[in-house]
Amino acid sequence: MPGEFDLIREYFEAATGPREDVLLGIGDDCALLRPPPGQILAVTSDTLVSGRHFAPDADPESLGHKALAVNLSDLAAMGARPAWASLCLTLPAADRDWLAAFMRGFAALAGRFDVSLVGGDTTRGPLAISLTLHGLLAPDQALRRDAARPGDALYVTGTLGDAGLALRLRQAGRPVPRVLAQRLDRPEPRVEIGRRLAGYARCAIDISDGLAADLGHVCARSGAGAVLEAARLPLSPPVRAHVAGRGDWGLPLSAGDDYELLFSVPPERQAAFERDSADWEVAVSRIGHIEAGSGVRLRQADGQCVEEIGGGYDHFSE
Ligand code: ADP
Ligand code: MG
């Protein structure tokens, strides 16, 4: 069985490409990194635990992708450019096939966004993956959650509820269409869009817990309320069919794992934003607005308002 240091040499040391700002990478007590002058660091961590965030027999290549994608999504929501990653793995055994596949998924996505793996930790125990990702941005470019103001329009990228539908089908033992499975297993972080938003958006968050809950976080932090227009929520055909068939808005509003960006644009920039974003490769939809007060309301197609939607996934609530 390979030892810890064999694993580090074989699977982590050369996993990702070099970056000029990495003075010292894997192999010493710390990595030494040089942020460019005038830029600040954006730092984010996420943990995926076997049995909680993924099934124990989940495809390791997809896990490698997803562990990085969910962190990239956080950097995107801040408007930061990805740079350095630190990977803490707890593994039940030194399984070479599993590690090789995991790092294939990780490295493919890291290469696309110029992320360098600069350190981490490898221990034995129940399978868990914890990643810390560092990004860079200009100090005045950060898209903070507390910056939404009444009158701002709310936009979201892509479509909502696809990952949630994939999870429900999989858990029910039913076939999962490939496009939906991709949305759950290989989410595409909206890094480019996050960077482009700097000139337009005031505030942004990525949707990991569900639209209602994440918009609730924005409202709480910004000291404001929000209205969502049900008829404007962007839905893929299968999610639209699910909503129409059951009148159940739970998937697009609270299922989570969407990794789309939700952001607010002040009135004076909305026209320019809508013009400029019309040909972006990912569709952007206006879905509501920020208003004075608190909480998130849903206005249905018939004009009726549902008060206080909200509530996504919370690990500690039962
Ligand atoms: P230390 O005992 O000084 O913390 P370790 O023996 O844990 O160092 O790790 C040796 C080197 O390998 C360090 O540079 C560490 O950052 C790196 N490393 C360990 N595990 C990982 C991993 N899963 N991914 C990337 N780098 C790792
Ligand atoms: Mg260590």
Image (cartoon, rainbow, N blue to C red):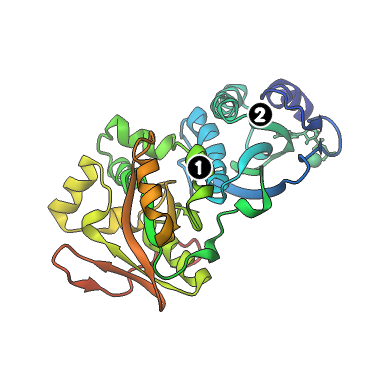
Dot 1, crowdedness within 10 Å: few (<14), some or many (≥20)? few
Q: Amino acid at mark 2?
A: Ala
Q: Where does the N terminus fall, quadrant-wise?
A: top right
Residue 46 screen position, x and y as percent? 59, 48
Q: Count up the numbered dots.
A: 2
- Where residue 131 appears, as percent x and y from the top left, is 63, 43
- On the picture, is 306 further left or further right than 99? left
**Residue drawn at point x = 50 percent, y = 58 percent:** 203
The picture places residue 110, in percent across and down from the top left corner, at 59, 29
Tell me: 9 left or right of 212. Answer: right
Say which quarter of the image contains residue 14: top right
Callout 2: helix, strand or loop? loop
Quadrant in which residue 84 is drawn: top right
Q: Residue furthest right?
A: 29
Q: Is residue 15 above or below residue 169?
A: above
Per the model, the C-alpha gap separating discs 1 and 2 is 41 Å
Q: Which residue is mark 1?
A: 196
Q: Residues within 10 Å of mark 2 (few under 14, many from 20)?
A: some
Identified by mark 1, the residue type is Arg
Q: In this view of the protein, can residue 185 be seen by the observer?
A: yes
Numbered tag placed on residue 94 in the rendering: 2
Would you say 203 lies left or right of 210 here? right
Q: Quadrant of residue 26?
A: top right
Q: Earlier in the sequence, mark 1 or mark 2?
A: 2
Question: Residue at position x 52%, y 39% from top?
Answer: 191
Nearest the viewer among 160 and 290 is: 290
Q: Is residue 28 above or below residue 207?
A: above
On the image, the x and y values in percent for residue 303 come to 17, 69
Q: Is residue 318 left or right of residue 81?
A: left
Answer with the quadrant where ligand 1 appears in the image. Answer: top right
